[in-house]
Amino acid sequence: MKLKLYKPLCLLLTGIIVFSACEDKDDSPNLGDSVGLWQLTGLTGTYTREVITKDGVAHSADAYPLVANWKDAAGFAAAAGVDEALVVGATNQTLAAFTAGDNAPGFPRTAVFDAAALAAVGISMQVDLLDSKSKSTPGTYTVKGTYPSLRLDETICNTYLMIPPPQINDTGDWTCNYETGVFTLSPVVDIEQVLPPFPDGIFAVNRDVEPATFSLDFLDRDAHDVLYSQVKSAWDETEDRTVSGLAGLPVNAGGGWDPTATTDPTSEAYIMSAALASWGGYLTWYAFNISAEAVAKVADVKNPLTDLDGDGTINAVDMIVYMHMDNLASGGGKTAFGLPYALLVDSSNPAAPAPVNDSANDWSLAGLATGGGGKMKYVITMGVCMPVNETIKFESSWTEVAQ
Protein backbone atom coordinates (compact mmCIF):
# COMPACT_ATOMS: atom_id res chain seq x y z
CA MET A 1 0.00 0.00 0.00
CA LYS A 2 2.75 2.41 0.88
CA LEU A 3 4.42 1.80 -2.46
CA LYS A 4 1.20 2.47 -4.35
CA LEU A 5 0.63 5.74 -2.49
CA TYR A 6 4.19 6.90 -3.09
CA LYS A 7 3.85 7.52 -6.83
CA PRO A 8 0.73 9.79 -6.64
CA LEU A 9 2.32 11.66 -3.78
CA CYS A 10 5.51 12.20 -5.79
CA LEU A 11 3.49 13.43 -8.76
CA LEU A 12 1.56 15.84 -6.54
CA LEU A 13 4.73 17.18 -4.96
CA THR A 14 6.36 17.53 -8.37
CA GLY A 15 3.38 19.49 -9.64
CA ILE A 16 3.53 21.83 -6.66
CA ILE A 17 7.26 22.38 -7.20
CA VAL A 18 6.82 23.02 -10.92
CA PHE A 19 3.89 25.38 -10.30
CA SER A 20 5.86 27.22 -7.63
CA ALA A 21 8.82 27.58 -9.96
CA CYS A 22 6.63 29.05 -12.70
CA GLU A 23 5.01 31.42 -10.24
CA ASP A 24 8.37 32.59 -9.00
CA LYS A 25 9.46 33.33 -12.55
CA ASP A 26 6.23 35.15 -13.54
CA ASP A 27 7.38 38.66 -14.40
CA SER A 28 4.29 39.79 -16.37
CA PRO A 29 3.60 43.55 -16.01
CA ASN A 30 1.32 44.64 -13.20
CA LEU A 31 -0.40 47.00 -15.65
CA GLY A 32 -0.70 44.44 -18.41
CA ASP A 33 -0.23 44.74 -22.16
CA SER A 34 -0.16 48.55 -22.19
CA VAL A 35 3.31 48.59 -20.63
CA GLY A 36 5.90 49.38 -23.29
CA LEU A 37 7.47 52.03 -25.50
CA TRP A 38 5.03 53.38 -28.10
CA GLN A 39 5.55 55.59 -31.17
CA LEU A 40 2.74 57.91 -32.32
CA THR A 41 1.62 56.89 -35.83
CA GLY A 42 -1.74 58.62 -36.22
CA LEU A 43 -3.54 61.56 -34.66
CA THR A 44 -6.94 63.20 -35.10
CA GLY A 45 -7.76 66.31 -33.13
CA THR A 46 -11.16 68.02 -33.08
CA TYR A 47 -10.76 71.53 -31.72
CA THR A 48 -13.63 73.55 -30.26
CA ARG A 49 -13.21 77.18 -29.22
CA GLU A 50 -16.12 79.16 -27.76
CA VAL A 51 -15.80 82.92 -27.30
CA ILE A 52 -16.29 84.16 -23.73
CA THR A 53 -16.77 87.53 -22.00
CA LYS A 54 -15.85 87.62 -18.31
CA ASP A 55 -14.59 90.08 -15.73
CA GLY A 56 -10.90 89.71 -14.99
CA VAL A 57 -10.11 88.03 -18.30
CA ALA A 58 -7.48 89.60 -20.57
CA HIS A 59 -8.91 91.05 -23.81
CA SER A 60 -12.48 90.56 -22.55
CA ALA A 61 -15.05 92.76 -24.29
CA ASP A 62 -18.78 92.85 -24.94
CA ALA A 63 -18.06 92.14 -28.61
CA TYR A 64 -14.97 91.39 -30.71
CA PRO A 65 -15.19 93.18 -34.08
CA LEU A 66 -12.96 91.99 -36.91
CA VAL A 67 -12.17 94.96 -39.15
CA ALA A 68 -10.72 94.39 -42.63
CA ASN A 69 -8.81 97.03 -44.58
CA TRP A 70 -8.84 97.57 -48.33
CA LYS A 71 -5.30 96.69 -49.38
CA ASP A 72 -5.21 99.42 -52.04
CA ALA A 73 -6.55 102.26 -49.88
CA ALA A 74 -3.21 104.05 -49.56
CA GLY A 75 -2.40 103.63 -53.24
CA PHE A 76 -5.77 104.97 -54.32
CA ALA A 77 -5.55 107.97 -51.96
CA ALA A 78 -2.11 108.92 -53.26
CA ALA A 79 -3.12 108.58 -56.92
CA ALA A 80 -6.42 110.41 -56.49
CA GLY A 81 -4.89 113.13 -54.33
CA VAL A 82 -7.29 112.63 -51.42
CA ASP A 83 -6.76 112.14 -47.70
CA GLU A 84 -5.63 108.59 -46.93
CA ALA A 85 -7.37 108.46 -43.56
CA LEU A 86 -10.64 109.39 -45.27
CA VAL A 87 -10.26 106.56 -47.79
CA VAL A 88 -9.24 104.05 -45.13
CA GLY A 89 -12.16 105.00 -42.90
CA ALA A 90 -14.63 104.81 -45.77
CA THR A 91 -13.44 101.49 -47.15
CA ASN A 92 -12.87 99.61 -43.89
CA GLN A 93 -15.30 96.75 -43.47
CA THR A 94 -16.38 95.18 -40.18
CA LEU A 95 -16.60 91.58 -41.26
CA ALA A 96 -18.05 90.22 -38.04
CA ALA A 97 -18.52 91.01 -34.38
CA PHE A 98 -18.08 87.91 -32.24
CA THR A 99 -19.86 87.72 -28.90
CA ALA A 100 -19.91 85.33 -25.94
CA GLY A 101 -21.15 81.89 -26.97
CA ASP A 102 -20.06 82.20 -30.61
CA ASN A 103 -17.61 79.79 -32.13
CA ALA A 104 -14.25 81.44 -32.69
CA PRO A 105 -13.73 81.84 -36.46
CA GLY A 106 -12.57 78.62 -38.06
CA PHE A 107 -13.85 76.46 -35.19
CA PRO A 108 -14.79 73.76 -34.57
CA ARG A 109 -12.23 72.18 -36.84
CA THR A 110 -10.68 68.75 -37.19
CA ALA A 111 -7.06 68.00 -38.08
CA VAL A 112 -6.15 64.49 -39.25
CA PHE A 113 -2.57 63.20 -39.46
CA ASP A 114 -1.26 59.86 -40.63
CA ALA A 115 2.39 58.93 -40.10
CA ALA A 116 3.57 60.93 -43.12
CA ALA A 117 1.55 63.99 -42.16
CA LEU A 118 2.85 63.84 -38.59
CA ALA A 119 6.41 63.94 -39.88
CA ALA A 120 5.59 66.78 -42.28
CA VAL A 121 4.42 69.11 -39.50
CA GLY A 122 7.09 68.11 -37.02
CA ILE A 123 5.08 65.89 -34.68
CA SER A 124 7.14 63.03 -33.27
CA MET A 125 6.16 61.49 -29.94
CA GLN A 126 7.22 58.39 -28.03
CA VAL A 127 5.51 57.52 -24.78
CA ASP A 128 7.15 55.04 -22.43
CA LEU A 129 4.46 53.49 -20.23
CA LEU A 130 6.45 52.12 -17.30
CA ASP A 131 5.02 49.44 -15.07
CA SER A 132 3.84 50.02 -11.52
CA LYS A 133 5.40 48.50 -8.41
CA SER A 134 2.20 46.63 -7.65
CA LYS A 135 -1.18 45.97 -9.20
CA SER A 136 -2.77 48.51 -6.85
CA THR A 137 -0.46 51.44 -7.66
CA PRO A 138 -0.15 53.59 -10.82
CA GLY A 139 2.68 53.31 -13.27
CA THR A 140 4.80 56.20 -14.45
CA TYR A 141 5.25 57.48 -17.97
CA THR A 142 7.62 59.67 -19.94
CA VAL A 143 7.00 61.37 -23.27
CA LYS A 144 9.82 62.43 -25.57
CA GLY A 145 9.76 64.08 -28.97
CA THR A 146 8.52 67.25 -30.64
CA TYR A 147 5.09 68.82 -30.94
CA PRO A 148 4.35 72.14 -32.71
CA SER A 149 3.28 74.85 -30.32
CA LEU A 150 0.75 77.63 -31.01
CA ARG A 151 1.80 81.05 -29.78
CA LEU A 152 -0.02 84.38 -29.69
CA ASP A 153 1.54 87.67 -30.80
CA GLU A 154 -0.62 89.99 -28.73
CA THR A 155 0.67 93.14 -30.45
CA ILE A 156 -1.29 92.24 -33.60
CA CYS A 157 -3.50 89.46 -32.17
CA ASN A 158 -2.01 86.83 -34.43
CA THR A 159 -1.84 83.13 -33.56
CA TYR A 160 1.15 81.43 -35.15
CA LEU A 161 2.83 78.04 -35.20
CA MET A 162 6.22 77.82 -33.50
CA ILE A 163 8.75 76.23 -35.86
CA PRO A 164 10.86 74.30 -35.02
CA PRO A 165 8.63 72.59 -32.49
CA PRO A 166 9.76 72.64 -28.86
CA GLN A 167 11.08 69.48 -27.27
CA ILE A 168 8.67 67.43 -25.17
CA ASN A 169 9.73 66.20 -21.77
CA ASP A 170 6.51 65.03 -20.08
CA THR A 171 6.20 62.76 -17.08
CA GLY A 172 3.57 61.63 -14.61
CA ASP A 173 1.40 58.69 -13.51
CA TRP A 174 -0.94 56.43 -15.47
CA THR A 175 -3.38 53.61 -14.86
CA CYS A 176 -5.67 51.50 -17.04
CA ASN A 177 -8.60 49.15 -16.53
CA TYR A 178 -8.92 46.31 -19.03
CA GLU A 179 -12.51 45.54 -18.03
CA THR A 180 -13.84 49.08 -18.55
CA GLY A 181 -11.33 50.19 -21.20
CA VAL A 182 -10.62 53.36 -19.20
CA PHE A 183 -7.17 54.97 -19.19
CA THR A 184 -6.11 57.74 -16.78
CA LEU A 185 -3.23 60.16 -17.11
CA SER A 186 -1.95 62.41 -14.30
CA PRO A 187 0.93 64.67 -15.37
CA VAL A 188 3.13 66.15 -12.67
CA VAL A 189 1.95 69.65 -11.89
CA ASP A 190 5.15 71.66 -11.52
CA ILE A 191 6.42 71.55 -15.13
CA GLU A 192 4.88 72.52 -18.47
CA GLN A 193 3.30 69.46 -20.08
CA VAL A 194 2.08 68.69 -23.59
CA LEU A 195 -0.31 65.87 -22.70
CA PRO A 196 -3.21 67.06 -20.52
CA PRO A 197 -4.63 65.26 -17.49
CA PHE A 198 -7.67 63.06 -18.04
CA PRO A 199 -9.43 60.40 -15.92
CA ASP A 200 -11.57 58.88 -18.65
CA GLY A 201 -9.54 58.11 -21.75
CA ILE A 202 -10.53 55.07 -23.79
CA PHE A 203 -7.77 52.64 -24.82
CA ALA A 204 -7.20 49.34 -26.60
CA VAL A 205 -4.10 47.16 -27.02
CA ASN A 206 -3.52 44.56 -29.70
CA ARG A 207 -0.56 42.23 -29.16
CA ASP A 208 -1.76 39.73 -31.74
CA VAL A 209 0.00 41.76 -34.43
CA GLU A 210 3.67 42.54 -34.92
CA PRO A 211 4.53 45.19 -33.92
CA ALA A 212 1.82 45.58 -31.28
CA THR A 213 -0.58 48.50 -31.54
CA PHE A 214 -2.13 50.79 -28.94
CA SER A 215 -4.95 53.30 -29.33
CA LEU A 216 -5.96 56.07 -26.95
CA ASP A 217 -8.81 58.58 -27.21
CA PHE A 218 -9.19 61.39 -24.68
CA LEU A 219 -10.65 64.86 -24.15
CA ASP A 220 -8.36 67.79 -23.39
CA ARG A 221 -10.40 70.17 -21.23
CA ASP A 222 -7.85 71.93 -18.99
CA ALA A 223 -8.29 75.16 -21.03
CA HIS A 224 -12.04 75.32 -20.32
CA ASP A 225 -12.93 77.32 -17.20
CA VAL A 226 -15.99 75.17 -16.47
CA LEU A 227 -14.86 71.68 -17.49
CA TYR A 228 -11.37 71.98 -15.98
CA SER A 229 -12.76 70.77 -12.61
CA GLN A 230 -13.14 67.32 -14.19
CA VAL A 231 -9.37 67.01 -14.56
CA LYS A 232 -7.69 69.34 -12.05
CA SER A 233 -8.42 71.11 -8.80
CA ALA A 234 -7.76 74.79 -9.52
CA TRP A 235 -8.11 77.21 -12.43
CA ASP A 236 -5.29 79.70 -13.10
CA GLU A 237 -6.62 82.48 -15.33
CA THR A 238 -3.15 83.61 -16.35
CA GLU A 239 -1.77 80.17 -17.17
CA ASP A 240 -4.83 78.26 -18.32
CA ARG A 241 -6.77 80.72 -20.48
CA THR A 242 -6.54 80.29 -24.24
CA VAL A 243 -6.77 83.44 -26.37
CA SER A 244 -7.72 82.95 -30.01
CA GLY A 245 -6.00 85.52 -32.23
CA LEU A 246 -7.21 86.20 -35.74
CA ALA A 247 -5.08 88.40 -37.96
CA GLY A 248 -5.80 86.58 -41.20
CA LEU A 249 -8.84 85.76 -43.27
CA PRO A 250 -10.34 82.27 -43.48
CA VAL A 251 -11.59 81.96 -47.06
CA ASN A 252 -14.02 79.83 -49.03
CA ALA A 253 -13.45 78.26 -52.45
CA GLY A 254 -14.13 81.59 -54.16
CA GLY A 255 -11.41 83.36 -52.17
CA GLY A 256 -13.96 85.22 -50.05
CA TRP A 257 -13.91 85.83 -46.32
CA ASP A 258 -15.81 83.02 -44.59
CA PRO A 259 -15.76 82.63 -40.79
CA THR A 260 -16.98 79.03 -41.12
CA ALA A 261 -14.11 78.02 -43.43
CA THR A 262 -11.71 75.49 -41.93
CA THR A 263 -8.80 76.54 -44.11
CA ASP A 264 -5.85 78.30 -42.53
CA PRO A 265 -6.34 82.09 -42.69
CA THR A 266 -4.73 83.84 -45.65
CA SER A 267 -3.28 87.33 -45.86
CA GLU A 268 -5.82 88.58 -48.40
CA ALA A 269 -9.45 87.86 -49.22
CA TYR A 270 -12.44 89.19 -51.08
CA ILE A 271 -15.66 90.12 -49.35
CA MET A 272 -18.55 88.04 -50.62
CA SER A 273 -22.27 88.19 -49.93
CA ALA A 274 -25.53 87.06 -51.48
CA ALA A 275 -26.59 90.72 -51.38
CA LEU A 276 -23.80 91.42 -53.89
CA ALA A 277 -25.20 89.04 -56.51
CA SER A 278 -25.34 91.85 -59.10
CA TRP A 279 -21.54 92.01 -58.90
CA GLY A 280 -20.89 88.27 -58.99
CA GLY A 281 -21.33 88.00 -55.22
CA TYR A 282 -18.22 90.12 -54.59
CA LEU A 283 -17.66 93.54 -53.09
CA THR A 284 -16.28 95.34 -56.14
CA TRP A 285 -15.17 98.92 -56.67
CA TYR A 286 -18.45 99.71 -58.42
CA ALA A 287 -20.56 98.02 -55.75
CA PHE A 288 -18.66 99.87 -53.03
CA ASN A 289 -19.15 103.23 -54.74
CA ILE A 290 -22.88 102.67 -55.03
CA SER A 291 -23.15 101.63 -51.38
CA ALA A 292 -20.98 104.52 -50.15
CA GLU A 293 -22.96 106.98 -52.27
CA ALA A 294 -26.20 105.71 -50.75
CA VAL A 295 -24.90 106.42 -47.26
CA ALA A 296 -23.78 109.89 -48.29
CA LYS A 297 -27.05 110.71 -50.04
CA VAL A 298 -29.18 109.64 -47.09
CA ALA A 299 -27.34 112.26 -45.05
CA ASP A 300 -27.68 114.95 -47.76
CA VAL A 301 -29.78 117.66 -46.14
CA LYS A 302 -30.60 119.43 -49.41
CA ASN A 303 -31.49 116.40 -51.51
CA PRO A 304 -31.67 113.26 -49.35
CA LEU A 305 -32.06 109.83 -50.86
CA THR A 306 -35.55 108.44 -50.29
CA ASP A 307 -37.24 105.06 -50.61
CA LEU A 308 -37.51 105.16 -54.38
CA ASP A 309 -38.50 101.53 -54.89
CA GLY A 310 -41.12 101.65 -52.13
CA ASP A 311 -39.93 98.58 -50.20
CA GLY A 312 -39.82 100.40 -46.87
CA THR A 313 -36.03 100.67 -46.69
CA ILE A 314 -33.39 102.99 -48.13
CA ASN A 315 -30.38 101.17 -49.48
CA ALA A 316 -28.18 100.56 -52.53
CA VAL A 317 -31.20 99.57 -54.65
CA ASP A 318 -32.64 103.03 -54.13
CA MET A 319 -29.27 104.51 -55.03
CA ILE A 320 -29.26 102.58 -58.31
CA VAL A 321 -32.69 103.98 -59.12
CA TYR A 322 -31.46 107.47 -58.21
CA MET A 323 -28.38 107.08 -60.45
CA HIS A 324 -30.55 105.74 -63.28
CA MET A 325 -32.83 108.78 -63.08
CA ASP A 326 -29.76 111.05 -63.11
CA ASN A 327 -28.41 109.21 -66.15
CA LEU A 328 -31.71 109.59 -68.02
CA ALA A 329 -31.68 113.30 -67.23
CA SER A 330 -28.03 113.60 -68.33
CA GLY A 331 -27.28 114.96 -64.86
CA GLY A 332 -23.61 113.90 -64.95
CA GLY A 333 -23.63 112.79 -61.34
CA LYS A 334 -20.49 111.37 -59.75
CA THR A 335 -19.75 109.55 -56.51
CA ALA A 336 -17.59 110.98 -53.75
CA PHE A 337 -14.73 108.89 -55.18
CA GLY A 338 -15.14 110.41 -58.63
CA LEU A 339 -16.91 107.62 -60.54
CA PRO A 340 -19.65 108.79 -62.94
CA TYR A 341 -23.10 107.39 -62.26
CA ALA A 342 -23.25 106.43 -65.93
CA LEU A 343 -20.30 104.11 -65.40
CA LEU A 344 -21.92 102.33 -62.47
CA VAL A 345 -25.47 101.91 -63.78
CA ASP A 346 -26.46 100.80 -67.28
CA SER A 347 -29.45 102.95 -68.26
CA SER A 348 -29.71 101.77 -71.87
CA ASN A 349 -33.15 100.38 -71.04
CA PRO A 350 -35.09 103.27 -69.47
CA ALA A 351 -37.47 100.84 -67.81
CA ALA A 352 -34.83 98.55 -66.28
CA PRO A 353 -31.70 100.08 -64.69
CA ALA A 354 -28.92 97.52 -64.31
CA PRO A 355 -25.86 97.84 -62.09
CA VAL A 356 -22.65 97.18 -64.03
CA ASN A 357 -20.90 93.97 -62.99
CA ASP A 358 -17.17 94.64 -62.68
CA SER A 359 -16.21 91.37 -60.93
CA ALA A 360 -14.30 89.88 -63.86
CA ASN A 361 -10.98 91.17 -62.53
CA ASP A 362 -9.33 92.61 -59.42
CA TRP A 363 -9.19 96.37 -58.90
CA SER A 364 -5.87 97.94 -59.82
CA LEU A 365 -4.37 101.43 -59.93
CA ALA A 366 -3.79 101.00 -63.64
CA GLY A 367 -7.51 101.33 -64.27
CA LEU A 368 -7.99 104.43 -62.14
CA ALA A 369 -7.76 106.91 -64.99
CA THR A 370 -10.42 105.12 -67.03
CA GLY A 371 -12.78 104.37 -64.15
CA GLY A 372 -11.87 100.71 -64.14
CA GLY A 373 -13.54 98.55 -61.56
CA GLY A 374 -12.79 95.14 -60.10
CA LYS A 375 -12.98 93.03 -57.00
CA MET A 376 -11.55 94.72 -53.91
CA LYS A 377 -9.07 92.71 -51.85
CA TYR A 378 -8.97 93.06 -48.09
CA VAL A 379 -6.36 92.44 -45.43
CA ILE A 380 -6.33 92.52 -41.63
CA THR A 381 -4.06 95.29 -40.38
CA MET A 382 -4.93 94.76 -36.72
CA GLY A 383 -6.28 91.40 -35.66
CA VAL A 384 -8.71 90.65 -32.89
CA CYS A 385 -7.92 88.78 -29.66
CA MET A 386 -10.79 86.70 -28.27
CA PRO A 387 -10.57 84.81 -24.97
CA VAL A 388 -12.11 81.39 -25.45
CA ASN A 389 -12.96 78.16 -23.71
CA GLU A 390 -11.23 75.34 -25.56
CA THR A 391 -11.65 71.59 -25.68
CA ILE A 392 -9.78 69.16 -27.93
CA LYS A 393 -10.96 65.63 -28.64
CA PHE A 394 -7.91 63.51 -29.50
CA GLU A 395 -7.90 60.11 -31.17
CA SER A 396 -4.40 58.64 -31.30
CA SER A 397 -2.80 55.46 -32.57
CA TRP A 398 0.61 54.08 -31.59
CA THR A 399 2.96 51.28 -32.58
CA GLU A 400 5.28 49.49 -30.16
CA VAL A 401 8.97 50.24 -30.46
CA ALA A 402 11.33 47.31 -30.01
CA GLN A 403 13.67 47.71 -27.02
Image: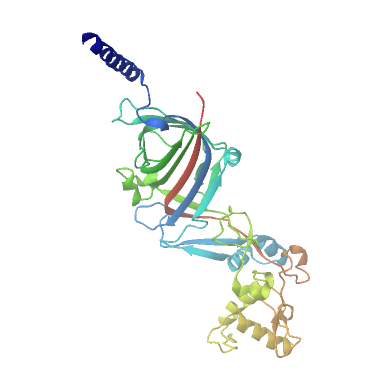
Residue 259 or 60: which is nearer the viewer? Answer: 259
Q: Residue at x 36, y 31 (%)?
A: 31
Which quadrant: the N terminus?
top left
Figure disc tally: 0
Q: Residue at x 52, y 48 (%)?
A: 159
Image quadrant where residue 311 sits: bottom right
Q: Position of residue 330 (x, y in %)?
A: 74, 88
Residue 141 or 336: which is nearer the viewer? Answer: 141
Image quadrant where residue 67 sits: bottom right
Q: Is residue 153 visible?
A: no
Residue 381 or 146: which is nearer the viewer? Answer: 146
Q: Position of residue 245 (x, y in %)?
A: 50, 52
Image quadrant where residue 161 sits: top right
Above/below status of 43 relative to 372: above
Q: Is residue 317 visible?
A: yes
Q: 6 left or right of 106?
A: left
Q: Position of residue 373 (x, y in %)?
A: 72, 70
Residue farthest along the front direction in this orientation: 1
Above/below status of 320 relative to 392: below
* Colouring chosen for the image of the structure: rainbow
Q: 194 left or right of 111?
A: left
Q: 49 left or right of 92?
A: left
Above/below status of 39 relative to 393: above
Residue farthest along the top direction in this orientation: 3
Q: Position of residue 9 (x, y in %)?
A: 25, 14
Above/below status of 69 relative to 32: below
Q: Residue at x 55, y 47 (%)?
A: 112
